[in-house]
Amino acid sequence: MTAAAVFQVLVVLYTVTNMASLGLELSLRETMKSLRSVRLVALTLVWGWVVGPAIAVLITKVLPLAEPHALGLLIFSLAPVAPMVSLLARRARSDMDFTAALVPLAMVATVVLLPVLAPLLMPGVTLDVWSLAKPLLLLVLLPLVVCAVFKVFATHVADRLFPAVKRLAGLSTLATLSFVVVFHFGDIVRTVGSYAIGAEVLFLLAIGLVSYQLGFGLKQGQRSAMALAMATRNGAPMLAVFTAFPDQDPRMLVMILLSGPVPAVVAFPLARFFASRAEQPAVQVIL
């Protein structure tokens, strides 16, 4: 088996297991209840797939990025909201119900909008909408929906399966990262000396702080949840889409894999900052 074939298998395992784990963790009823907020849905779509990509395009015009790094940043901009946003939201003392609704909404929106917007943002690259949508539907949306529905009808079984699936997701993530480090170590080192990491940091700070400051009526806890959601990126759909690119440049792959460590470095300090702005809980004085 060739290295390319091994990588394809690892991407499938990584994406499916991580989406299955997320589906088994979701509370579908609570999520559907939260999604009744028109403001939540509208702002998520605007920040995630209008303002975010616009910022990314601007950065590619300002910074002298290599073309594969620029393409990676554009894909990076089209996959907001990582599952780790729940952990960040707790640290930031954000609205947890609001946060819980952001993750599945962003997953579905990514599956629909990423394959539509990517060809528009990359006019020089030959991309077919269906070739991008197919891996997202099969590897991202299908396991997420199946496992979320399974949890509704077999909650106790799903809860027992969750630790094993979560462990498998962790192992597949480690295997995928290890493979990339071994086979693309030179590209990773060269990325450190380029503008690539700085471009991602600049993008995340810009979309995170702008979405926090312009809350459009959201409460502070909701604004911080939205900002943290936008300041994180979901690697699973990005990797799934990468496999559909006609020219799979390793520099673009490295840019996508930075969607794990770079948002973490940016988002955890943001979470502490938002926590300092959160309303202090009332102190009861017992006489």
Image (spheres, rainbow, N blue to C red):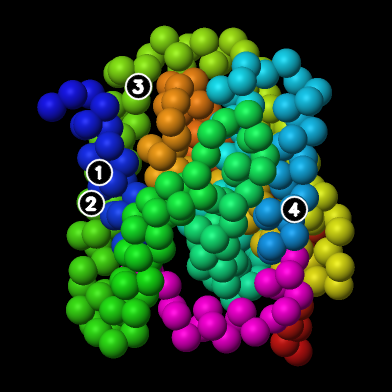
- Going from N to C along the chain, the mark reached first, 1 or 4, is 4
Q: In what element is the residue under mark 4?
A: helix
Label at residue 181: 3
Alpha carbon separation for disc pair 4 and 3: 33 Å
Quadrant of the snapshot with the C terminus? bottom right
Q: Nearer the viewer, residue 92 or 128?
A: 128
Q: Residue at x 43, y 31 (%)?
A: 246
From the image, tell me which residue sits under label 4: 50
- Going from N to C along the chain, the mark reached first, 4 or 3, is 4
- Going from N to C along the chain, the mark reached first, 1 or 3, is 1
The answer to whether one can see residue 221 in this image is no
* Residue 37 shown in magenta: yes
- Going from N to C along the chain, the mark reached first, 3 or 2, is 2
Q: Residue at x 52, y 10 (%)?
A: 190
Q: State which mark lies toward you, 4 or 3.
A: 4
Q: Do the numbered discs 2 and 1 sit on residues whose CB atoms are within 8 Å?
A: yes
